[in-house]
Image: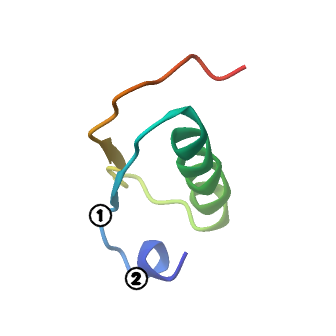
Amino acid sequence: MDLHKRGFRIAIHGNGDRAIESILDAYEYALPAKPRADHRRRIGHIQTGLPKT
């Protein structure tokens, strides 16, 4: 959350469904808490990913 508040662009390595879900949960928490028009969040190296249910 600190890097988001300070304006950094966040890129996280996500490998597997559980990791990706945790990253998405973190983004969903941080973005409404400190909204920015151009946040550019990214998950890199996604090897598996299922639609979030």
Q: How many marks?
A: 2
SS label for mark 2: loop
Local crowd at mark 2 within 10 Å, few (<14), some, or many (≥20)? few
The image's colour scheme reads rainbow
User: What residue appears at the point 34 percent right and 29 percent down from the top-left corner?
Assistant: 47
Q: Which residue is mark 1?
A: 9
The percent coordinates of residue 12 (x first, y second) are: 36, 56
Q: For the view shown, which residue lies furthest in the right direction? A: 53
- The amino acid marked with disc number 2 is Arg
Q: Residue at x 60, y 40 (%)?
A: 18
- Residue 2's place in the image compared with 33, above or below, is below
Front position in the image: 36 or 30: 30
Instruction: Judge whether 28 appears above or below 18 on screen.
Output: below
Where residue 49 sits: x, y (%)? 47, 24
Mark 1–mark 2 distance (CA, rounded to whole Å): 9 Å
On the image, the x and y values in percent for residue 5 come to 48, 78
Q: Quadrant of the N terminus?
A: bottom right
Mark 1 Cα within 10 Å, few/some/many (few <14, many 20+)? few
Quarter residue 46 falls in = top left
Amino acid type at image mark 1: Arg
- Residue carrying label 2: 6
Is 10 above or below relative to 45? below
**Towards the viewer: 46 or 29:** 46
